[in-house]
Image (cartoon, grey):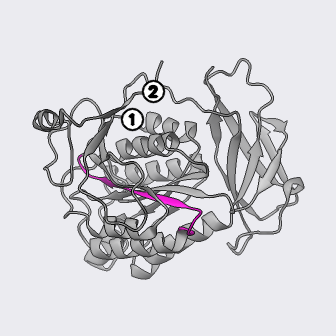
C-alpha cells in the first residue's frame, strides 16, 4: 500500500474549483465529499518575514487504505514529570527512568531535554459553534505563538477547522507569519470536521522535511459534527507519526462568558467530546486544559508552552520488531523512587511496516 499523493492542481484549477474539490478561504465550503481535503499554498515554505501571496491550493487526500511508514526505528517518547505541587521535575537523568514495552523492561538509549526543536500544528476551530469570546481566543493564540516558538529552532503551522480543513499557514520559523494568519481568519461558520483535522495535521507534520518533536495543539470545543474518518483512525495516525496532542477545550469558557457559570448544557454530545479530547491527549502524552475565563485561557497556553520546554525525550531504539509488523506496542514509563510524582507519556507506538 502506498501513501496517498499530494496532488498539485495548477492547470486544472478552474475546472477543479467548479467541481467543488478546491477549498480556499474565499470560497464557501461545499457539501462534504467522500474524501477529506485540505487546501494549502503551493509553496510549502514561504520566505520568512514576507507577506504570504494569494495561495494556489494543493489537495491532500486520505484514502482508507493508507499506511503511514516510519523512516527510522527510533521511537521518541516525550515525558513530563510533575512533583506533588504540580511543578516540573527538572533534575532527572537516564538512570532515573524505567521503560517497559509490552510489559517487558526495555533499554533507554538516551535522554534529551527540551532543546529538541518543535514542529507544531495548531488546529483552530472556526466553525459556527465557536462564537462567544472568539476574539480573545485569537489573542491568546497569538501570544502563544509569540511565546512558544524559539527563533531559529522551532516551526509552527496553522490549520482552520470548519466544514473542511484549511492549511492557513504552512510551517514557518517566523511567529509573525502565524500571527498574520490567525488574525486574518474569516468569521466562524459551518460544521466541525475536527477528527479530519487531527488526521491531516499528523500527516502534514510527518511528510514535511526537518526534524523535531511533532506537536498538535487543538483550540476547540472538541465536538465533531461532520467527518470522513473515525476516532480510532485519527488517533492511529497521530500515534504512527509520533505526534503529541494538547487540547485547549473551550466549552466551559464559552459557558462562563454567556452565563457566568462553568456549568452549561451537559448533553451527551458535549460529554462525548470531552472524553474524546482527554483520550487523544492521554494516549499521545499531552494534556487537556478547560479554562473558564480569560485568565485561565491565557494560563492554559502558558502551561502548554512550559510543558513543551520542560519535557524529557526518551530515546528508544527497538532491537528487533520481528513478529510485530504494523502492530501497536504498549509503552509504560516510570521514575525510580518517584512516589507522589505524576509521569505523563505516550501510551504506545506502531511498529514500522516493512
Say if the magenta span includes residue 156: yes
CA gap, disc 2 and disc 1: 18 Å
Looking at the image, tell me whether mark 2 or mark 1 is earlier in sequence order: 2
Label 1 residue SS: loop
Q: Relative to 3, say whether 185 is above or below.
A: below
Report the side of 89 relative to 219 (left or right).
right
Q: Residue at x 76, y 69 (%)?
A: 89
Q: Is residue 234 left or right of residue 116?
A: left
Q: x, y percentage for residue 178?
A: 39, 65
Q: Which mark is residue 230?
A: 1
Q: Which mark is residue 3?
A: 2
Q: Which residues are magenta?
A: 149-163
Nearest to the observer: residue 338 or residue 191:
191
* Residue plotted at (73% across, 71% down): 84
Question: Where's residue 58, x and y in %?
Answer: 30, 40
- Position in image of residue 94 (x %, y %): 85, 54
Q: Nearer the viewer, residue 105 or 73?
A: 73
Q: Residue at x 35, y 64 (%)?
A: 251
Q: Is residue 131 magenta?
A: no
Q: Residue 131 appears at what percent x and percent y?
A: 23, 67
**Total numbered circles:** 2
Tag in front: 2 or 1: 2
Tell me whether circle 2 and circle 1 mark residues in contact (CB < 8 Å). Answer: no
Q: Is residue 62 visible?
A: yes
Local SS, label 2 = loop
Q: Answer whether residue 225 is visible to the viewer in this image.
A: no
Residue 66 has which mark? Answer: none
Amino acid at each position: 500500500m502506498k501513501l496517498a499523493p499530494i496532488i498539485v492542481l495548477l492547470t486544472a484549477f478552474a475546472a477543479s474549483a467548479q467541481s467543488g474539490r478546491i477549498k480556499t478561504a474565499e470560497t464557501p465550503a461545499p457539501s462534504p465529499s467522500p474524501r477529506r481535503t485540505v487546501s494549502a499554498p503551493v509553496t510549502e515554505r514561504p520566505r520568512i518575514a514576507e507577506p504570504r501571496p494569494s495561495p494556489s491550493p494543493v489537495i491532500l487526500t486520505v484514502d482508507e487504505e493508507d499506511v503511514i511508514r516510519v523512516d527510522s526505528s527510533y521511537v521518541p517518547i516525550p515525558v513530563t514529570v510533575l512533583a506533588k505541587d504540580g511543578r516540573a521535575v527538572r533534575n532527572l537523568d537516564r538512570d532515573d527512568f524505567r521503560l517497559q514495552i509490552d510489559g517487558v523492561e526495555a533499554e533507554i538509549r538516551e535522554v534529551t531535554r527540551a532543546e529538541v526543536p518543535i514542529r507544531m500544528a495548531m488546529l483552530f476551530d472556526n466553525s459556527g459553534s465557536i462564537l462567544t469570546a472568539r476574539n480573545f481566543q485569537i489573542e491568546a493564540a497569538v501570544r502563544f505563538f509569540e511565546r512558544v516558538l524559539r527563533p531559529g529552532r522551532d516551526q509552527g503551522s496553522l490549520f482552520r477547522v470548519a466544514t473542511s480543513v484549511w492549511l492557513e499557514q504552512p510551517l514557518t520559523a517566523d511567529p509573525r507569519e502565524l500571527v498574520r494568519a490567525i488574525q486574518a481568519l474569516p468569521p466562524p461558520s459551518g460544521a466541525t470536521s475536527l477528527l479530519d483535522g487531527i488526521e491531516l495535521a499528523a500527516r502534514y507534520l510527518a511528510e514535511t522535511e526537518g526534524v523535531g518533536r511533532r506537536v498538535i495543539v487543538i483550540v476547540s470545543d472538541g465536538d465533531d459534527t461532520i467527518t470522513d474518518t473515525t476516532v480510532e483512525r485519527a488517533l492511529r495516525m497521530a500515534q504512527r507519526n509520533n505526534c503529541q496532542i494538547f487540547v485547549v477545550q473551550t466549552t466551559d469558557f464559552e459557558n462562563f462568558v454567556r452565563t457566568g457559570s462553568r456549568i452549561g448544557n451537559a448533553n451527551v454530545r458535549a460529554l462525548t467530546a470531552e472524553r474524546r479530547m482527554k483520550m487523544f491527549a492521554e494516549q499521545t502524552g499531552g494534556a487537556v486544559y478547560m479554562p473558564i475565563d480569560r485568565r485561565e485561557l491565557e494560563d492554559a497556553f502558558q502551561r502548554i508552552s512550559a510543558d513543551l520546554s520542560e519535557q524529557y525525550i526518551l530515546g528508544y531504539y527497538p532491537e528487533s520488531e520481528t513478529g510485530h509488523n504494523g502492530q501497536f506496542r504498549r509503552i509504560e514509563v516510570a521514575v525510580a523512587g518517584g512516589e507522589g510524582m505524576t509521569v505523563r507519556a505516550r501510551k504506545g507506538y506502531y511498529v514500522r511496516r516493512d
